Image: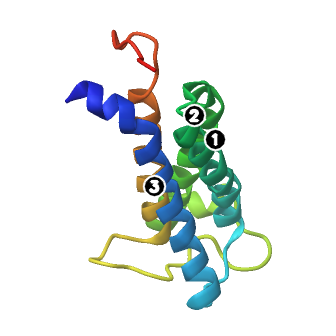
Amino acid sequence: MQARLHALSLYFAWVVSLVAVGGSLYFSEVMGFEPCKLCWLQRICMYPLVYLLGRASYLNDRKIIGYALPLSILGGCISIYHVLEQKVPGFADILPCSSGIPCNTDYINWLGFITIPILALTAFILITVFLLMGRNRGTGIEETE
């Protein structure tokens, strides 16, 4: 089971990034939700992952993990701050959005807690976990060609 997850980890990370980018584009282009400053920063981290992870999963190139992991972790950190800004009123004063859409705006609020930053954070966490599972070092799994 662990060997199978290791073998498919790049593919799973790529699928998560595809769903995240698709959802992002759906919310902005179809639903008409204008992204805030923090949403743009999260997009900057997520959008390249579609290409990087897609190419890496097609070629089974595990060297990309060293390049994709920092993007995923940075995007996750931005998402954490965005969630805190939406859910904890004191965080909105630390780095307020000075122009455009306020970063603490809830466009969606499914089940009382699922917002767009929560969805982004979930995607970044899943991608990070899949990338960590796919590393060659310390897994004890030999790759066969």
At which x and y percent is residue 84? 49, 57
Q: Residues within 10 Å of mark 2 (few under 14, many from 20)?
A: some
Left or right, 28 with respect to 37, comes to left
Q: In this view of the protein, can residue 88 be seen by the observer?
A: no
Q: Amino acid at mark 1?
A: Leu
- Quarter of the view holding residue 87: bottom left
Earlier in the chain: of badge 3 and badge 2, it is 3
Vertical relation: 91 (above or below) 101: above
Task: Work out which residue is located at the far right of the displayed protein and give it.
Answer: 99
**Badge 3 element:** helix
Q: Are marks 1 and 2 in contact (CB under 8 Å)?
A: yes
Q: Secondary structure at mark 1?
A: helix
Q: Nearer the viewer, residue 9 or 24?
A: 9
Residue at label 1? 71
Left or right: 122 with respect to 21? left
Residue 53 x %, y %:
58, 44
Q: Nearer the viewer, mark 3 or mark 1?
A: 3
Relative height, residue 31 to residue 77 (above, below) = below
Identify which residue is drawn at 34% across, 14% down: 141
- Label 2 belongs to which residue? 69
Q: Identify the residue at image location x=54%, y=27%.
A: 62
Q: Name, please, the residue furthest toward the front.
A: 145
What is the quadrant of residue 74 in the picture? top right
Q: Residues within 10 Å of mark 1 (few under 14, many from 20)?
A: many
Amino acid type, label 3: Val
User: From mark 3 to mark 1, how far is it between C-alphas?
Assistant: 16 Å
Please tell me the numbered disc located at residue 15.
3
Q: Check disc 2 and report its element: helix, strand or loop.
A: helix
Position in image of residue 104 (x %, y %):
56, 72
> Dot 3, crowdedness within 10 Å: few (<14), some or many (≥20)?
some
Are the two marked residues, 3 and 2, in contact with CB atoms closer than 8 angstroms? no
**Residue that appears at 65% across and 44% down:** 52
